[in-house]
Image (cartoon, rainbow, N blue to C red):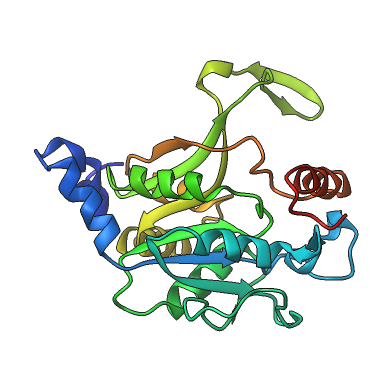
Amino acid sequence: MGPNRSRIGRKYRGFRGRGADPASILRDVRDEPVAALVLAAGRGERLGSELPKAFVPVGGVTMLGRSIERLLCVEQIGRVQPVVPHDAPELTGVAADPRIAGPVVGGAERQESVAAGLAALPREVRWVVVHDAARCLVEPADVRRVIEAAAETGAAILARPASDTIKLVSDGAVTRTLDRAACWAAQTPQVFRRDLLAEAHDKAQADGFLGSDDAQLVERLGVEIRVALGGERNLKITWPADLALAEQWLRSAGEGVT
């Protein structure tokens, strides 16, 4: 990255190698304020719904509502901040909980929505859990695991190893076959120290860089991002077939509308 490597990037790249006690680092995550941003500002045209995607019901509860409920099961999370489109309908079907903040309006791009959510968090929040509302079947145990993984370097994601052979394609032709053993499919939540995530977004904005997830922005700081194994059912609902599969899973677990 050269001589201009970020200050925070330098700090966290060597976090595990400075003799820090892992138990004390984990206590830092558990004891310091943790907030979750639930990104729900997407339109979801591919789902074919007139509603914003996160407000489409899955087994009788909206994606946003289900995501919030599952995050609230994680004891480390003290605040859940929804980020919604400007024309979002009222959120219903979620039990009243003082940890749920009033929604803020996101932007057309993911980075704009995360920036809006970050700006709405109280100053004392030190750790941020970024989650896509469309991954509404995430298991609370997986959320706990990725929060604990973030304690090692200041950044962690849920992901799963690729099961298919991965091809790079350009203009309809294969240009390269990747080593499947080294390929993982990223999920959310993704967890970061707040100052680290804020610096990554500031740098991306200054550089005019648009990433596909927050981990990609943090990677650009030279920070080591840890990986925690995500669940098979933590799919991102994008297409009607995804919605049907999620509802089938909920019915099999006795959680969906029959």
- Could you say where residue 142 lies in the image, as x and y percent from the top left? 49, 44
Query: Among all residues in the image, which is located at the extreme front?
Result: 254
Identified at 22% across, 54% down, the residue is 27
Identified at 76% across, 81% down, the residue is 89
In the image, residue 132 sits, relative to residue 220, either above or below, namely below
Task: Pick whichever, 222 or 57, lies toward us.
Answer: 57
User: Left of 150 or right of it: where is 66?
Assistant: right
In the image, residue 119 sits, relative to residue 156, either above or below, namely below
- Could you say where residue 101 lies in the image, as x and y percent from the top left? 51, 80
Quarter of the picture holding the N terminus: top left
Dividing the picture into quarters, in which one does residue 125 lie? bottom left
User: Left of 43 or right of it: where is 236?
Assistant: left
Dividing the picture into quarters, in which one does residue 168 lie? top right
In the image, residue 51 sits, relative to residue 70, either above or below, namely below
Identified at 42% across, 53% down, the residue is 191
Quarter of the picture holding the C terminus: bottom right
- Could you say where residue 124 lies in the image, as x and y percent from the top left? 29, 76
- Could you say where residue 163 lies in the image, as x and y percent from the top left? 65, 21
Task: Pick whichever, 256 or 84, lies toward us.
Answer: 256
Query: Among all residues in the image, which is located at the extreme left?
Result: 19
User: Left of 236 or right of it: where is 225?
Assistant: left
Evaluate whether residue 13 shows in this view: yes
The total number of labels drawn is: 0
Task: Pick whichever, 86 or 62, lies toward us.
Answer: 62
Evaluate whether residue 221 shows in this view: no
Dividing the picture into quarters, in which one does residue 52 lie? bottom right
